Image (cartoon, rainbow, N blue to C red):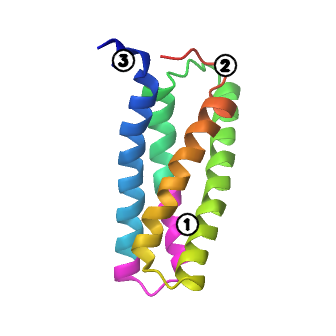
Amino acid sequence: MKLIQSNKQIISYLFWGVLTTVINIIVFVLLQKFTSWDYFINNGIAWIVSVLFAYVTNRKWVFNSKSNSLKEYLKEFISFSVGRFASLLIEDFILWLFINALGINSNIAKIIGQIAVIVFNYFWSKLAVFKNKKDC
């Protein structure tokens, strides 16, 4: 029990991160299946949906943000979005590399990209976005 309590933030991040990843992948796969759009467009749409979900869950249940003012809220959201945009670029590179250069299935490439994104996003959120927030 003490191990869980001492790692509550990481466990919470992984729980919400898995849900965010599932949402991202489902949106991507559905768009790949039902549209003829380029995978970069589909990935961008999946990214927007999952970033909005991730911000709400990370702010409230992972890092327990106590920001009260609109200014603090906007600063957090912008910083969060910048980090997520950086991870989108990382994932887009991974997708390009795996799909175009290595010929791997787009859905498998997406899952691999999401693993890299989860790690990057945790550290960005912890060290840049919610850095002044008290750990759980």
Q: Which mark is residue 44?
A: 1
Q: Tag 3's secondary structure?
A: helix
Magenta residues, start to end: 32-48
Mark 3 or 2, which is nearer the eye? Answer: 3
Mark 1 or 2, which is nearer the eye? Answer: 2
Report how far apart the C-alphas of labels 1 and 2 lie in the structure.
Answer: 30 Å
Mark 2 crowdedness (10 Å alpha carbons): few <14, some 14-19, many ≥20: few
Q: Earlier in the sequence, mark 3 or mark 1?
A: 3
Name the residue type under label 3.
Answer: Leu
| Residue located beneath label 2 in the image | 132
Which residue occupies the foreground of this view, 124 or 33? 124
Q: Earlier in the sequence, mark 1 or mark 2?
A: 1
Mark 3 or 1, which is nearer the eye? Answer: 3
- Which residue: 53% across, 80% down? 99
In the rendered image, the vertical position of residue 101 relative to residue 30, given as above or below: below
Residue 52 image position (x, y, % from top left): 50, 47
Quarter of the rendering containing residue 91: bottom right
Q: Which mark is residue 3?
A: 3
Quarter of the rendering containing residue 87: bottom right
Q: Quadrant of the N terminus?
A: top left
Disc 1, disc 2: CB below 8 Å? Answer: no
Residue 44 image position (x, y, % from top left): 55, 66
Mark 3 crowdedness (10 Å alpha carbons): few <14, some 14-19, many ≥20: few
In the rendered image, the vertical position of residue 25 relative to residue 4, given as above or below: below
Residue 133 image position (x, y, % from top left): 60, 18
